[in-house]
Image (spheres, rainbow, N blue to C red):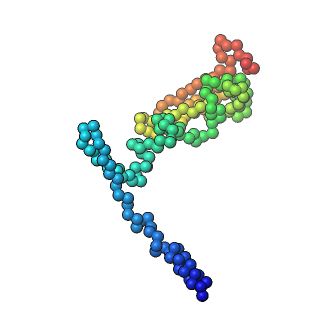
Amino acid sequence: MRGSIVAALFAGAFVVACSNAAKPTASQAPPPPPVVRVVATDAGAPTVVTRVELSEGDFVESERNRDPFRPFANVAKGAVKPPPNQRFVKLRNASIDELKLIAIVLGGDGGRAMFVDSKGKGHVLRPGDYLGRPESVRVGTTGPEYQVNWRVDRVREGDVVLLREDPAQPQVAAVTRVIPLKPEGDKFDPLD
């Protein structure tokens, strides 16, 4: 009998402790009262300082409220990415001025030209191939930004003709650049 009374009391305490009715939820809990401090100033008159209430919107990043853990260099720079190039470009990280024309093969489908980059690696190009580091162009002051590249137009006996066209402005003449096989006034050594 004594064991059944202890078991009944234990079961009753267990039910009361585990019931949801006894737990207050976050929505039922009253908000904490605002903290009011009284601070004495040099003039002797007390000043009342009240607690500032913050909302979730105060922690959202905006132009007035920057994330202190994000690098400032990205904010100052604007983190602007160049627009993606939509065509296959050979030697995309090399400037045209860094390339050396070392060989020309004529015949067949318009010829081929071999360029050597600044690392000494050779690349064979045909007419129609795009090459070199792209240049970003904007139409007007508010137009979209896009990239233009040099294109091999013709491979001739002693030089290669490169062409740069602006597809957004067809009325503007294309820019032409001729790269000679043997630069004038320079002893050409392909193994240099």
Question: In which quadrant is the N terminus drawn?
Answer: bottom right
The percent position of residue 123, horizontal first and vertical second, equals 70, 31
Q: Quarter-wise, where is residue 178 in the image?
A: top right
Q: Quarter-wise, where is residue 182 in the image?
A: top right
The percent position of residue 52, horizontal first and vertical second, equals 35, 50
The percent position of residue 5, horizontal first and vertical second, equals 57, 84
Can residue 82 be seen here? The reply is: yes
Looking at this view, is 7 or 47 the one in front? 7
**How many marks can you see?**
0
Give the vertical position of 158 relative to 169 (above or below).
Answer: above
Q: Quarter-wise, where is residue 120 in the image?
A: top right
Can residue 169 be seen here? The reply is: no
Q: Residue at x 28, y 40 (%)?
A: 41
The percent position of residue 75, horizontal first and vertical second, equals 47, 38
Q: Residue furthest bottom?
A: 1
Q: Residue at x 68, y 21 (%)?
A: 181
Looking at this view, is 192 or 130 the one in front? 192
Looking at this view, is 71 or 6 the one in front? 6
Left or right: 98 as drawn, with respect to 140:
right
Give the vertical position of 96 relative to 31 (above or below).
Answer: above
Looking at this view, is 64 or 162 the one in front? 64
Q: Residue furthest front?
A: 2
Give the vertical position of 44 relative to 124 (above or below).
Answer: below
Question: In which quadrant is the C terminus drawn?
Answer: top right
Q: Residue furthest right?
A: 191
Q: Residue at x 65, y 11 (%)?
A: 185
Q: Residue at x 48, y 73 (%)?
A: 20
